[in-house]
Amino acid sequence: MDSSAKKWLVFIMCIFLLAALFLVARYESVRFATKMGMEPHKIYVSDASKPCLECHKRKGVAPNMITQWEGSKHAAKGIDCVQCHTAEKGDFDAFTCPESSTLVAQFPTPKDCAKCHKEEVQEFTESKHAFPFWIYANADRAVFEPIIGTKHGCEECHQITNFWPDGSVGECDACHPKHSFSIAVARQPETCGECHIGPDHPHIELYLESKHGNIFKASVQGQVDMNFKSSDTDPIPIEVPVCTTCHMDAVPGVKGTHNVSARLAWESQAPWSYRTVWFDEKLGSWEDKRKRMAGVCVNCHSETFTDLYLLTADLVNLQYNEIRRAFVYWNKKYTASGIVHRTEMDGKFYSNPVINGWDEKPEVLMYETWHHEGRRFRHGSEMMGADYTQWHGVWEMQHKLQEMIEYGAEHGDEEAKIIAESTSPTKFMPYKLYDFPGNEWGIGTEKNRVPVLYKIIPDYWEKIKANVEEAVNHGLLTKAQWDIWMERYNNKEHYLGTKYPPHPIFEAYKARNKKDMAELKRQAIGLKLPSPTAFDDVH
């Protein structure tokens, strides 16, 4: 083959390669657009909106928002600029667009969305997403943080509770991005994680460390079209739940909703955990809300697992209240005795130890143990976030409770001094306990694993039983949950594993551990270096 033919062959191959790359790029672009709910379609633009699009494109004013809109279902249905941005003279956000006489609404609000999405907006308005957070948060904003720090801090997320002058509340585009309004983006756990993150409500971290989150990252994320339409009759179309699956999407047997409170049985973000009465005239009792959430769980889990897991989370919420009760007790005691001072401004009592305290260490300890560790303890138990239930939750709460008691001991409180100086393990639990025999995943199989409290507290299980029974009588647990608890209680030797002989592998590993400990002592503890320390060498 002569050189001229070779050049032509290379040229033709390059053309084929470029064509192949173009087709692949186009395929990937279409696939991505479809996954994000922006599949190619015919675009319908009204005569009234054409000048808006032409001007924005011509002047280069946010041209990408037009591209996003063009890929949306709104564009395919002829929902364009004027339907969302129409304004009337006197509207709070009305302005005249430059170089035109068109009156434009600067801030489309949920009231505008409700023209087409009435049910969704109503459900959102009745949810805790619309709850005015400053009912709780005013004090910490006013005391702990300079106000400017919250403008791109708290308020960046809590704009979802924004109260508009037109009577509507919220920001639909906090979840559905402008101007694509993608359902797929709204379903991404990371979208919820824009706000549900951090030391006081680390829900995205909880999700990502859970089995749910791990399966999502391994087999769903980036592989599945998240723009699906959920159904209360058809199976869940993804392998593992995302945030919206549990809290919003329809699943077989459970209707979909934009009211994220419709499936929550606890107010577990509050200073105390209590069974929700939020819109109970419409959403029903806490048992009704719990039934909806359990109805989601049983699409993937057995009823036995679901019931026990939710019972465990319920007992954690009740246990939190007893720890909270201890903090309130000490703070009120210290205030009454003058160890903690009342904070008054203009005759108003600002340092309320029952709810919030701000200016002295015991008050700050109590606040953080609610607002940070207490939420992590409770929410970790509800969302399979073991690390947050334990190390970032109750472990930190326990440390702060000891700090609270030590503070009183150092300032002359005799009761606090007795606890601080005690050598009993029970010093760490000056509050009443909840528990159940065994664990969530099965039974214990080794007598040596029985916690020390079981051994040193007289009649431990009888006392626990009395506490759980009182919670049932108080309407905080159901009769069905009491039956589950009693089945465990009546068979506790089985669930604790104390009725079974020593486990052979455990016995073998005890021998191996003895060998390990001998090497630990020889290699590390027993090693004596000949030279002095650096400090001793020069002093």
Image (cartoon, rainbow, N blue to C red):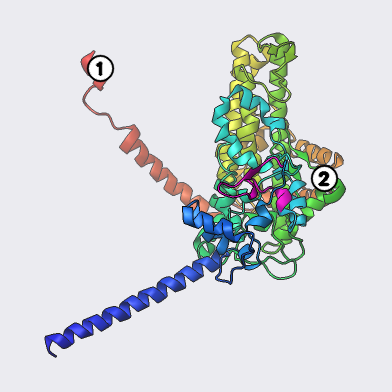
Q: Earlier in the sequence, mark 2 or mark 1?
A: 2
Residue 511: % across, % down? 45, 48
Q: Quadrant of the C terminus?
A: top left
The numbered mark at residue 33 is none
Residue 316: % across, % down? 69, 41
**In the foreground, 36 or 7:** 7
**In the foreground, 22 or 389:** 22
Confirm whether residue 64 shows in the render. Answer: no
The numbered mark at residue 536 is 1
Confirm whether residue 489 shows in the render. Answer: yes
Q: Secondary structure at mark 2?
A: loop
Answer yes or no: do the residues labelled 2 and 1 have beta carbons within 8 Å?
A: no
Q: Secondary structure at mark 1?
A: helix
Residue highlighted by disc 2: 279
Residue 118: % across, % down? 77, 55
Amino acid type assigned to the residue bearing label 1 in the image: Asp
Please state the extent of the stretch shown in magenta in the rendering: 91-112
The answer to whether residue 154 is left or right of residue 474 is left
Amino acid type assigned to the residue bearing label 2 in the image: Phe
The answer to whether residue 30 is left or right of residue 356 is left
Looking at the image, the residue that sits furthest to the bottom is 1
The answer to whether residue 29 is left or right of residue 141 is left
Q: Residues within 10 Å of mark 1 (few under 14, many from 20)?
A: few
